């Protein structure tokens, strides 16, 4: 029988975790958790049996703008691997920030059958200075004007920097800087790089 896990109340405190750890999970094509490694389980605060069979949004934090997940699912459902910065929520309600790489698992016919997620910590200064302000603004736009407006803002934000979302994240982590460039042509073009799916 399917069980539902009660959502925790968000806390303004961070999970105390070893940020050298790598958090791993595997889901089916619909995002249902099939496997989580010990580090994922420990940081999330859930028991293994509470995670397996649950949708991956069990660890989604309400501070996350929906547009990030729209870009995520649009990308991986189009057979494109992607990495994103996510604010997750543990069972205690505490938060933890991770950069998550989602790799597509495909069968021999190239059909997507699942996803493998690898999560690592993000430098705190990157979160505080760049990611958190951007995500707060996107969330405010969503609450005031809806998902489409939030998406249009994010696309314009990335085009101003002449970067895809992944390029922007990589640049922040590598340099600690947000370099703005002139707006390029093709406002909705090239948000994500295409990568070959991983064969099962």
Image (spheres, rainbow, N blue to C red):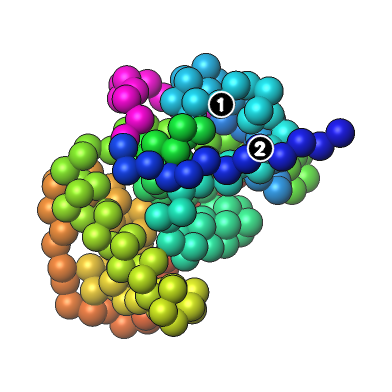
Task: Please check the rendered image and state whether residue 19 is part of the magenta-colored stretch, yes or no.
Answer: yes
Q: Main secondary structure of the magenta part?
A: loop
**Horizontal arrangement in the rendering, residue 68 relative to residue 132 (left or right):** right
Q: Look at the image and give the residue range highlighted in magenta.
A: 14-24
Question: Residue at left 14%, top 62%?
Answer: 179
Residue 183 x %, y %:
23, 79
Mark drawn on residue 5:
2
Instruction: Residue 160: name its quadrant.
Output: bottom left
Residue 71 seen: no
Residue 100 x %, y %:
43, 40
Tell me if residue 25 comes above or below residue 85 in the rendering.
above
Tell me if residue 176 comes above or below residue 2 in the rendering.
below
Residue 150 x %, y %:
41, 74
First in sequence, mark 1 or 2: give its number.
2
Q: Are marks 1 and 2 in contact (CB under 8 Å)?
A: yes
Residue 33 x %, y %:
66, 35
Instruction: Residue 25: name its quadrant.
Output: top right
- Give the residue number, with chain letter if any, for mark 1: 46
Mark 1, secondary structure of its residue = loop
Q: Nearer the viewer, residue 190 or 99?
A: 99
Task: Please check the rendered image and state whether residue 21 is part of the magenta-colored stretch, yes or no.
Answer: yes
């Amino acid at each position: 029988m399917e069980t539902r896990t009660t959502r925790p109340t968000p806390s303004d405190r961070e999970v105390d975790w070893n940020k050298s750890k790598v958090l791993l999970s595997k889901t089916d094509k619909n995002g249902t958790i099939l496997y989580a490694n010990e580090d994922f389980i420990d940081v999330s605060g859930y028991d293994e049996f509470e995670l397996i069979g649950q949708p991956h949004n069990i660890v989604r934090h309400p501070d996350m703008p929906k547009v990030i997940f729209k870009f995520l699912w649009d990308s991986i459902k189009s057979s494109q691997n992607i990495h994103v910065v996510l604010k997750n929520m543990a069972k205690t309600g505490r938060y933890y920030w991770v950069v998550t790489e989602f790799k597509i698992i495909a069968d021999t016919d190239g059909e997507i059958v699942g996803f493998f997620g690898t999560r690592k910590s993000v430098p705190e200064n990157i979160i505080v200075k760049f990611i958190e302000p951007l995500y707060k603004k996107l969330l405010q736009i969503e609450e005031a004007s809806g998902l489409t407006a939030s998406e249009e803002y994010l696309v314009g934000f990335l085009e101003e920097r002449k970067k895809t979302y992944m390029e922007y994240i990589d640049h922040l982590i590598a340099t600690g800087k947000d370099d703005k460039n002139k707006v390029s042509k093709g406002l909705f073009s090239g948000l994500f790089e295409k990568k070959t799916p991983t064969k099962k």
